[in-house]
Image (cartoon, grey):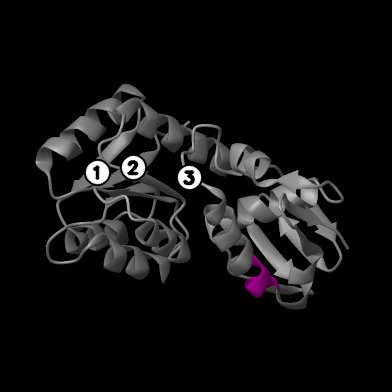
Amino acid sequence: MDTLKILVVDDEERMRKLVRDFLIKKNFDVLEAGDGEEAVDIFYENKDIALIILDVMMPKMDGWATCREIREISEVPIIMLTAKADEKDELLGFELGVDEYISKPFSPKILVARVEAILRRTSAVTDEKLEVGGLVIDQAAHEVSVDGKVIELSFKEFELLTYFVNNQGIALSRERILNNVWNYDYFGDARTIDTHVKKLRSKLGEKGSYIKTIWGMGYKFEI
């Protein structure tokens, strides 16, 4: 199996080295960038980057602007690093299509565990297609179509929809969704799920009504 390539973007060389060393120990191929502009250039030059670890506060182009530019051309998984603990920043990250959000200081081991969890889910695809109520989820192509028209979903939106469809008719608590879609060690809260469900419903159009809200608990996918 080819070594998976990770792009680490942070203006602090010490932080990049710390993250790089832990990733290399897990046999990842690591690329580095010291600011957003350099990160975008590297991303354009390397089409096989499997995941990006992206700091928010950087010179020239910050993490938000970098994420926006990359999201215009790719749904590559992005883990955002920030020194801030402001929930508005976290929600903005998820609005931009960030897959995980980690506040500094953090445990490098936890960061690597999240990288591995995302890449396991990305790589663990099958040829199976899930078809229900006009929706087709092509797990091999990581593609969703609504009434024959392909729609653009972020990595996490795709995972969330797939989880809903695989558990249709079952009342799912927010905690259960977090544990299964965001992995057991995610430290976020229910607003993360609510933000993603809102965007997912919007992208599904009238099919978004399949995702029912269970007040005080969570959600249920039902046709």
Q: Residue at x 87, y 50 (%)?
A: 169
Q: Determine whether label 1 and label 3 are within 8 Å by CB.
A: no
Using the image, determine if residue 192 lies above or below residue 40.
Answer: above
Q: Nearer the viewer, residue 128 or 205?
A: 205
Q: Which mark is residue 6?
A: 2
Residue tagged 3: 188
Residue 86 horizontal side relative to residue 57, left or right: right
Q: Quadrant of residue 209?
A: bottom right
Q: Nearer the viewer, residue 108 or 136?
A: 108
The answer to whether residue 128 shows anywhere in this view is no
| Type of the residue with mark 3 | Gly
Q: Which residues are magenta?
A: 200-204
**Secondary structure of the residue carrying numbered label 1:** strand
Image coordinates of residue 58 in percent, x first then y, are 16, 58
Image coordinates of residue 120 in percent, x first then y, are 54, 35
| Type of the residue with mark 2 | Ile
